[in-house]
């Protein structure tokens, strides 16, 4: 297991990398200020078009969406409907072809990559289907990273507490390769909530898990969301997971439909 100072140094290097080399303007390099007034997430007429073999492919077509602070929203739809692309645009990991995206007061379209990286450190936790843990770090070290990036004094205590909350108090020193899929996803959950972000984006968090393990992860995700009043946007095609959210929207062929349409679809399923 790496020393605490070593993790701190690695985290600091990541921060310096995010800040350096870009020649930021004064507007781009100022402090990150979060605006958590409603709607905390707003997408207006968002289009995403990607090049195809014979012609451009329309991934998202005129998406409009507002999400309130503390709300839990499920975005449901079949594979290939644009769900993950929508989440990537909310996170600033994909640029829309046109339209506006504002998250916690940040213009996600106009900000540069360095600015977006610093914004995500403060405002967002992201949970991916594939976990994306750092393989050379233990479970505890993985959860420590976002806390060290923010310079939290109680980083080790906070990381240990979160791992215990998700039932991994005996797995602190285990590397990802020594953990089951369900345990890795619970580490990813603990990491996503470590810095107490006001917004959490989760892309098919139970997609690679068996039913029992997936149910446990859902329960722990719900517990953590309620404890922190986190705004949760959940990308899923899982009926039970979608029904655990306060509101559902459906995405089909790149277009977003309201919760009434989502309810009709899932009641018929």
Image (cartoon, grey):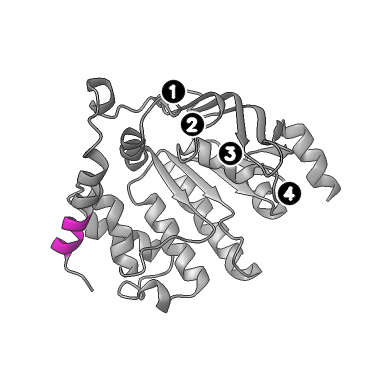
Residue 77 in view of the camera:
yes
> Residue 220 lies in magenta, yes or no?
no
Q: Residue at x 59, y 54 (%)?
A: 204
Report how far apart the C-alphas of labels 1 and 2 lie in the structure: 7 Å
Q: Earlier in the sequence, mark 3 or mark 2?
A: 2
Q: Residue at x 16, y 68 (%)?
A: 3
Tell me whether circle 4 and circle 1 mark residues in contact (CB < 8 Å).
no
Report how far apart the C-alphas of labels 3 and 1 lie in the structure: 22 Å
Report how far apart the C-alphas of labels 3 and 2 lie in the structure: 19 Å
Q: Position of residue 186 (x, y in %)?
A: 46, 63
Residue 69, label in figure: 2
Magenta part of the protein: which range?
Answer: 4-10
User: Which residue is the extreme one toward the bottom?
Assistant: 178
Identify the residue position indicated by label 4 in the image.
78
Q: Residue at x 69, y 51 (%)?
A: 237
Q: Earlier in the sequence, mark 4 or mark 3?
A: 4
Q: On screen, 192 above or below 49?
A: below
Report how far apart the C-alphas of labels 4 and 3 lie in the structure: 13 Å
Q: On screen, 261 above or below 177?
A: above
Report how far apart the C-alphas of labels 4 and 1 lie in the structure: 32 Å
User: Which residue is the extreme one toward the left?
Assistant: 5
Q: Which one is closest to the eye, mark 4 or mark 1? A: 4
Density class for disc 2 (Cα within 10 Å; few <14, some 14-19, many ≥20) is: some
Residue 37, label in figure: 1
């Amino acid at each position: 297991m790496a020393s605490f100072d070593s993790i701190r140094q690695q985290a600091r290097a990541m921060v310096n990398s995010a800040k350096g080399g870009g020649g930021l303007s004064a507007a781009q390099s100022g402090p990150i200020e979060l605006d958590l007034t409603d709607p905390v997430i707003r997408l207006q007429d968002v289009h995403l078009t990607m090049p195809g073999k014979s012609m451009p492919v329309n991934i998202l077509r005129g998406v409009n969406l507002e999400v309130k602070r503390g709300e839990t929203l499920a975005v449901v739809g079949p594979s290939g409907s644009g769900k993950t692309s929508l989440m990537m645009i909310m996170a600033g990991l994909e640029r829309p072809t046109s339209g506006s995206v504002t998250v916690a007061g940040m213009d996600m379209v106009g900000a540069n990559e360095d600015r977006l990286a610093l914004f995500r450190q403060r405002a967002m936790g992201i949970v991916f289907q594939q976990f994306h843990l750092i393989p050379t770090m233990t479970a505890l070290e993985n959860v420590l990273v976002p806390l060290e990036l923010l310079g939290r004094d109680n980083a080790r205590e906070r990381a240990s507490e979160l791992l215990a909350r998700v039932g991994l108090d005996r797995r602190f020193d285990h590397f990802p390769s020594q953990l089951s899929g369900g345990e890795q996803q619970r580490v990813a959950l603990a990491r996503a909530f470590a810095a107490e972000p006001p917004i959490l984006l989760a892309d098919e968090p139970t997609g690679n898990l068996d039913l029992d393990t997936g149910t446990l992860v859902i329960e722990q995700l719900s517990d953590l969301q309620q404890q922190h009043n986190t705004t949760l946007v959940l990308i899923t095609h899982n009926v039970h997971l979608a029904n655990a959210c306060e509101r559902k929207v459906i995405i089909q062929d790149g277009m977003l439909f309201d919760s009434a349409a989502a309810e009709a679809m899932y009641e018929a399923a």
